[in-house]
């Protein structure tokens, strides 16, 4: 039996060694896996396939890369136990030397003044301020001053890729969470604690974690408060006493000992206001077109596509240097079988543009400013325009038309856009001596108002497609090569506020007017016919004497004045001027109620000795009359 068992084991080992047992099945599985890998490689997005994996492959700005890397290196003392290298302070000695070279006899006989001039103050640039923040001293836990870094910028520029590559380059294991997906505060708290208080135990290379929170601007306020509480958490232990309670509390509420990188598109979301004060802010600039064009050229060459530099520059300009949109557009064209890409193809393709709102001021500036001509050097060393036909003042008319129309459609705020155009078009530098352009612009504004009224009253929202053409028309009417000086529109708000104030004042007057008078007037007749002439009625020509010396005619005028004021609920209110004098103001104010411009001062201001005494007399007489009645 022992001999038979040994032979059976040898036979099984030979079958396994020479592939007689399950050999064809293994080969079939390997072929299936190869087919699946080939199919997955073809269907894989080029953005993921050609994404940077090393620090030298990044397309972002070098200053932003170095700042984020330096901030991560500030955590080396508490995370890796490495001592920080303190650089000596740099003293700028060139400025005093240059000043002394310009005027060598300035401080020859004033040694004290020469010593004072060495401590001159200069304005610091943004890079110098950032360097000072990175060179600040660590706290008592050997952590940097700012516990969280916040990258902000438009989507598609590579912020998340930069955070991943920098964290791996600094020796961290990346843990990413999306703040927009984790809407629950408990889940957000659990993920932060798991990423910052635990380390990776899988694999041979056990690295500390670096937490990356993407789309932090979409997180709720409760999640931001949890992150702030984690940043401001202090060490809970107070000594050796306390036993297990202190250890549990320290384990549960320990200080933050791992770096956190937050990524957002809009830095000025109201929910991020408290977090901005405690974060190391890094504004992500747009990618340089030359770098992006070189990377797109490499991708096109690898995928067998031919595109010159001018075409790739036009693609970068169309997508606003968005890396993701550029690569996705090339993959889309490659999937349609196009191996030759030219400028006309890039301009005619429907993809590549992002549906995003760049702000009202950007739309107004593009509307009132002519685009500049951009020239590129092609592969033969010749100057080439991004389009085939370029006008003397800028881009072709069709391209300008499509550009302004796309910006207006992307904004969606047609009311505010039209208000901004109305408040700023008269300040543009346009040669229009006969006011033809102004009249045409006013006609288009009237058409836009009528169109908007038809849409709102009739609920016919299919007409909204015609609203963006107002911006296009104003671009061709008032666009100029100079940079426009724009102001935010306030006329609509001011007019609405004055209208509401006038309506409230009319309602108050109508409510207090006696029924015998109120039955014969309305708010329209009161504001249009009566109030416009009421000041002249309330200002009779009286002599500046004691009221007891009035004649019979003057007393009759005074009696009519009092009856009119009582009928329309008018009275005089005593007010003190900044000079210390007392004046009488008619309530409610006529200018506020009628909405007309103020009349001459002598018509508004009561006559000295007449109207003031008349007001006092009117008040006294009205009281006496009321008592007698």
Image (spheres, rainbow, N blue to C red):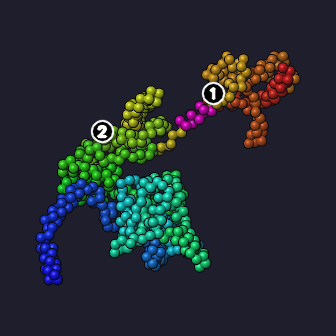
- Tell me if I can see residue 436 in this picture: no
**Which numbered marker is on residue 398?**
2
> Hey, which quadrant is residue 259 in on the image?
bottom left
* Image coords of residue 468 (percent x, y): 39, 36
Is residue 494 located in the magenta-colored stretch of the structure?
yes
> Residue 243 versus residue 103: which sits nearer the camera?
243
Q: CA distance from mark 1 to mark 2?
A: 48 Å
Q: Position of residue 257 (x, y in %)?
A: 48, 71
- Which residue is found at the position 41% from the left and 29% from the top? 460
Query: Looking at the picture, does residue 429 appear above or below residue 301?
Result: above
Q: Is residue 519 visible?
A: yes
The residue segment tinted magenta is 491-501
Does residue 196 appear to the left or right of 396 in the view shown?
right
Residue 249's disc number: none
**Residue under pointer 1:** 594
Q: Secondary structure at mark 2?
A: helix
Please determine whether, in this image, residue 368 is positioned above or below residue 379. above
Q: Which of the 4 image quarters holds residue 411? A: top left
Q: Position of residue 279 (x, y in %)?
A: 50, 62
Query: Magenta: predominant secondary structure element?
Result: helix
User: Viewed as shown, does residue 17 lie left or right of 326?
Assistant: left
Q: Residue furthest bottom?
A: 3
Q: Secondary structure at mark 1?
A: helix
Residue in the foreground of this view, choosing between 562 and 265: 265
Question: Image quadrant for the N terminus?
Answer: bottom left
> Mark 1 or mark 2, which has the lower sequence index?
2
In-image side of 586 versus 268 (left or right): right
Residue drawn 32% across and 54% down? 324
Quick one: which residue is furthest to the right in this view?
548
Is residue 111 shown left or right of residue 196?
right
Q: Is residue 44 above or below residue 234?
A: above
Q: Pointer 2: residues within 10 angstroms few (<14), some, or many (20+)?
A: few
């Amino acid at each position: 039996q022992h001999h038979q068992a040994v032979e059976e084991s040898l036979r099984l080992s030979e079958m396994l060694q020479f592939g007689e047992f399950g050999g064809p099945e293994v080969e079939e599985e390997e072929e299936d896996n190869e087919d699946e890998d080939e199919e997955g490689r073809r269907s894989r997005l080029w953005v993921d396939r050609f994404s940077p994996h090393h620090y030298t492959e990044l397309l972002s700005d070098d200053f932003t890369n170095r700042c984020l890397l330096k901030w991560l290196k500030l955590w080396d003392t508490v995370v890796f136990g490495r001592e920080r290298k303190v650089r000596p302070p740099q003293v700028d000695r060139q400025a005093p030397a240059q000043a002394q070279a310009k005027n060598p006899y300035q401080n020859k006989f004033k040694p004290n003044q020469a010593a004072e001039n060495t401590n001159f103050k200069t304005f610091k640039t943004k890079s110098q301020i950032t360097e000072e923040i990175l060179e600040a001293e660590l706290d008592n836990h050997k952590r940097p001053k700012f516990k969280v870094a916040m990258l902000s910028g438009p989507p598609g520029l590579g912020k998340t890729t930069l955070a991943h590559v920098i964290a791996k380059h600094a020796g961290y294991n990346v843990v990413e969470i999306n703040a927009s997906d984790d809407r629950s505060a408990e889940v957000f708290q659990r993920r932060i604690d798991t990423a910052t208080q635990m380390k990776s135990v899988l694999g041979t290379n056990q690295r500390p974690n670096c937490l990356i929170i993407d789309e932090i601007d979409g997180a709720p306020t409760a999640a931001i408060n949890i992150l702030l509480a984690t940043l401001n958490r202090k060490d809970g232990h107070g000594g050796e006493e306390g036993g297990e309670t202190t250890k549990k509390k320290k384990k549960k509420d320990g200080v933050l000992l791992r770096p956190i990188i937050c990524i957002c598109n809009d830095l000025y979301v109201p929910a991020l206001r408290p977090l901005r004060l405690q974060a190391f802010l890094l504004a992500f600039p747009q990618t340089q077109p030359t770098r992006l064009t070189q990377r797109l050229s490499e991708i096109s060459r690898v995928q067998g596509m031919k595109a010159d530099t001018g075409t790739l520059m036009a693609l970068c300009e169309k997508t606003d240097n968005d890396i993701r949109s550029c690569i996705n557009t090339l993959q889309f064209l490659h999937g349609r079988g196009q191996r030759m890409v030219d400028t006309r193809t890039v301009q005619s393709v429907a993809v590549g543009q992002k549906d995003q709102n760049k702000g009202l001021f950007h739309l107004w500036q593009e509307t009132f400013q002519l685009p500049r001509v951009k020239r590129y050097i092609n592969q033969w060393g010749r100057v080439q325009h991004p389009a085939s036909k370029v006008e003397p003042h800028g881009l072709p008319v069709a391209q300008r038309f499509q550009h302004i129309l796309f910006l207006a459609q992307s904004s969606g705020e047609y009311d505010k856009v039209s208000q901004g155009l109305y408040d700023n078009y008269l300040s543009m530098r346009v040669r229009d001596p006969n006011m033809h352009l102004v009249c045409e612009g006013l006609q288009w504004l009237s058409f836009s108002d009528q169109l908007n009224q038809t849409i709102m009253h009739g609920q016919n929202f299919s007409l909204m497609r015609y609203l963006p053409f107002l911006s296009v028309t104003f671009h061709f009417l008032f666009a100029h090569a100079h940079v426009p000086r724009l102001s935010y529109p306030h006329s609509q708000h001011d007019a609405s506020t004055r209208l509401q104030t006038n309506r409230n004042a009319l309602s108050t007057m109508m409510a207090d007017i006696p029924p015998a008078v109120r039955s014969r007037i309305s708010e329209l007749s009161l504001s249009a016919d009566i109030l416009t002439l009421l000041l002249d009625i309330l200002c009779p020509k009286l002599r500046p004497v004691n009221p007891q010396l009035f004649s019979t005619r003057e007393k009759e005028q005074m009696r009519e004045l009092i009856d009119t004021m009582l009928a329309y609920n008018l009275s005089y209110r005593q007010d003190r001027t900044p000079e210390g004098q007392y004046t009488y103001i008619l309530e409610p104010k006529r200018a506020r109620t009628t909405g007309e411009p103020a009349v001459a001062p002598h018509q508004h201001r009561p006559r000295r000795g007449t109207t003031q005494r008349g007001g006092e007399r009117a008040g006294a007489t009205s009281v006496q009359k009321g008592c007698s009645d």
